[in-house]
Amino acid sequence: MKVKDITDKIINNFGGIKFEKTCDQLMSGSYDAEVAKVATTFMATVDVIKQAIEYGANLIITHEPTYYTACDGTDWLKDDPVYLKKKELLDSNGIAIWRFHDHMHAAPTDLIYDGLLKEIGWEDYLICGLKFPHCYEIPEMSLRDLCSFFKEKLDMETIRIVGSPDTKCRRVGILVGGGSLGLGVEEMPMQLMRKQNLDVMVCGDITEWTLCPYIRDAAALGMNKSMLILGHERSEEAGMKYMAQWLEPMLDGIPVKFIDAREPFAYL
């Protein structure tokens, strides 16, 4: 099975959605290459590429960019030593990289959210009638306990919060990745908190002048509001873990392995 056979099968399996303009493109290698093994990951970092080579994969399916900007443009990188070394690593090992982002979020159910929910086991807590944004009613716990829950489920050592650790959390919103930036509507996360009377918002990315001060002000005014920040990678990586599980049965015996890109930050 060639790279193009696999990418077409993935897109067609979810309704054959066709975008006029999409970042879901081949970032390395050839569509005509025969695929031996596949690796899925949040981001094809050099560490992930080396693990894929060790595994014997010659196709990496990544959710996020390989070359540092949203659309993976490389004109600005032609003389950059980091880009040149990374490209040499890919080319010398015959690695194809295909990005699966726009179609993944636009599937009948958002496949990134599907993976996260599978990882944390909240499928039955989704508030009826709300497909997106994702809001949940969970058994009540403190923000401190909710942090412990996500640390265990997503293998995290540190989670940032806004609000009191003792905040009672029952109605929870989740906005993965860049969703917590508003998806082009800067006020959307604050409006969602108000309309759904959320106690806590679980976020991927944050902007420190939008939802963050809104919750700080609400908490300072005695309202039961808080925020838990997973980061972009931790909030979305489980979607690529889940992808490896549903993809392998589609590929006629080609092995598929998930490679965790890991949280990019260390904390001192």
Image (tube, rainbow, N blue to C red):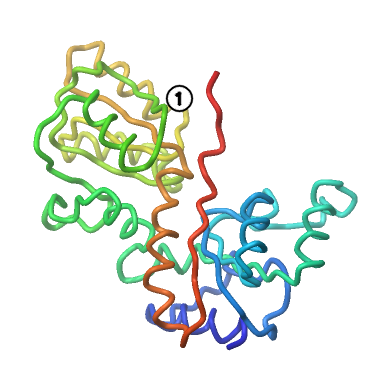
Q: Secondary structure at mark 1?
A: loop
- Residue shown at 72%/78% (left/top)? 30
Observer-nearest residue: 199 or 256? 256
- Residue shown at 28%/50% (left/top)? 133
**Residue position for label 1:** 209
Is residue 137 rendered to the left or right of residue 4? left
Q: Quadrant of the N terminus?
A: bottom right
Query: Which amino acid type is shown beneath numbered disc 1?
Result: Trp
Observer-nearest residue: 134 or 53? 53
Residue 239 in percent (x, y) is at 40, 58
**Extreme residue in the right direction:** 79
Q: Is residue 221 above or below residue 136?
A: above
Is residue 157 rendered to the left or right of residue 3? left
Residue 96 in percent (x, y) is at 68, 71
Residue 204 in percent (x, y) is at 42, 40
- Residue shown at 33%/30% (left/top)? 228
Q: Is residue 63 above or below residue 137?
A: below
Which class describes the residues within 10 Å of circle 1: few (<14), some (14-19), or many (20+)?
Answer: few
- Residue shown at 39%/80% (left/top)? 249
Count numbered badges in the picture: 1
Is residue 55 rendered to the left or right of residue 161? right
Is residue 97 rendered to the left or right of residue 164? right
The image quarter containing residue 147 is: top left
Observer-nearest residue: 170 or 158? 158
The image quarter containing residue 268 is: top right
